[in-house]
Image (cartoon, grey):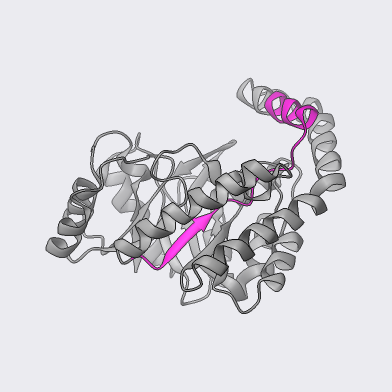
């Protein structure tokens, strides 16, 4: 079963209940609440789930406000990290009340003002479509500086996760593929965190678009994420990439979905992620493409 991410609705629908009913009309049996399209009206969520039979399959931490405070789970600032833990527990409560068994969470980024400035500069160069040689130096600086300070952030991330599971031991969480080259997680670092939390309901949520873009920015090959963490993969977010932008319907960009299918375990939740700028036919063609590739 492939479920639909609310990314596709954008700002068109104001409530979670409307999104559930629209998903049912499109033939989807499950729904992911995404932080990219935050929803503040959850009052009609439970009735809509009962009426349609649609399952709330996954919640991205941050779906309530889109502010992404959960990215501070790996912060070296104790106050920010504590606030992130409380915010994530609020999303856990939402999941429990809606009968959702999976909450996906960002691992955060390696901090430091100089590194953040370099990351912003890199995104600016990408938007201006600068040549590869112009990007190379900035990419290498970011990756090198992130590697120097990654261990401290990984330690804080593990502490936060232990604190969360101490208060909510029955919820299933999954760490997301990072969106930035200075993300705290790498395939190897993700393995370390999962091993540290072994025995807890912690998995990995693979994002095909993010993995592809990170590889283009000097990160590990896109397949390394899925192959290294396949045994703990709880979900896979399926979207394509054109140039340096994700959110395209599967089959319209450069992601190798045959390869994705080869390392995606049968039990992993499939989530179709398509930007709001695409129409209904694009969305349904993306779902058909995934079926043909056994995803």
Instruction: State the extent of the magenta-drawn residues as a range.
Output: 100-122
Residue 263 against residue 218 in the figure, above or below:
below
Q: Residue at x 69, y 62 (%)?
A: 190
At a point 66% along the width and 55% down the height, the residue shown is 222
* x and y, in percent, of residue 130 in the image: 70, 23
Residue 52: image x %, image y %? 15, 62
Q: Quadrant of the C terminus?
A: bottom left
State the quadrant of the N terminus: bottom left
Q: Where does the image place residue 66, in percent across and percent down from the top left? A: 44, 38
Which one is nearer the viewer's eye here, 140 or 196?
A: 196
> Vertical placement of 64 versus 256: above or below?
above
Q: Nearer the viewer, residue 20 or 73?
A: 73
Furthest-top residue in view? 128
User: In this view of the protein, which residue sits in the foreground, 16 or 208?
Assistant: 16
Measured as percent of width and height from the top left, residue 38 is found at 37, 40
What residue sits 50% from the left and 52% below the top?
A: 88
Q: Is residue 222 visible?
A: yes
Identify the image quadrant of residue 143. top right
Q: Is residue 288 magenta?
A: no
Q: Magenta stretch: residue 107 in it? A: yes
The residue under the point 35% across, 56% down is 94
């Amino acid at each position: 079963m492939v479920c639909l991410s609310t990314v596709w609705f954008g700002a068109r629908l104001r409530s979670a209940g409307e999104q559930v009913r629209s998903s049912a009309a499109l033939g989807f049996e499950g729904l992911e609440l995404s932080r990219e399209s935050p929803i503040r009206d959850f009052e009609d969520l439970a009735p809509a789930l009962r009426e349609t039979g649609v399952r709330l399959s996954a919640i991205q931490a941050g779906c309530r406000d889109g502010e992404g405070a959960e990215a501070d789970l790996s912060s070296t600032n104790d106050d920010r990290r504590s606030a992130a833990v409380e915010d994530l527990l609020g999303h856990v409560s939402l999941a429990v009340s809606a009968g959702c068994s999976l909450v996906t969470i960002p691992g955060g980024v390696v901090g430091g003002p100089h590194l953040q400035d370099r990351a912003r500069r890199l995104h600016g160069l990408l938007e201006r479509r600068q040549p590869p040689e112009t990007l190379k130096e900035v990419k290498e600086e970011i990756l090198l500086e992130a590697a120097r300070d990654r261990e401290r952030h990984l330690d804080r991330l593990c502490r936060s996760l232990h604190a969360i599971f101490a208060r909510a031991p029955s919820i299933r969480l999954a760490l997301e593929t990072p969106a930035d080259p200075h993300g705290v997680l790498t395939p190897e670092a993700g393995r370390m965190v999962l091993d540290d939390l072994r025995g807890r309901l912690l998995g990995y949520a693979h994002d095909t678009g993010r993995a592809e873009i990170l590889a283009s920015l000097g990160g590990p090959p896109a397949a390394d994420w899925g192959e290294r963490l396949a045994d703990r993969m709880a979900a896979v977010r399926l979207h394509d990439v054109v140039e340096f932008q994700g959110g395209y319907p599967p089959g319209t960009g450069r992601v190798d979905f045959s390869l994705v299918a080869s390392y995606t375990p049968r039990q992993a939740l499939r989530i179709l992620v398509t930007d709001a700028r695409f129409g209904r036919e694009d969305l349904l063609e993306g779902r058909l493409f995934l079926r043909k590739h056994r995803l």
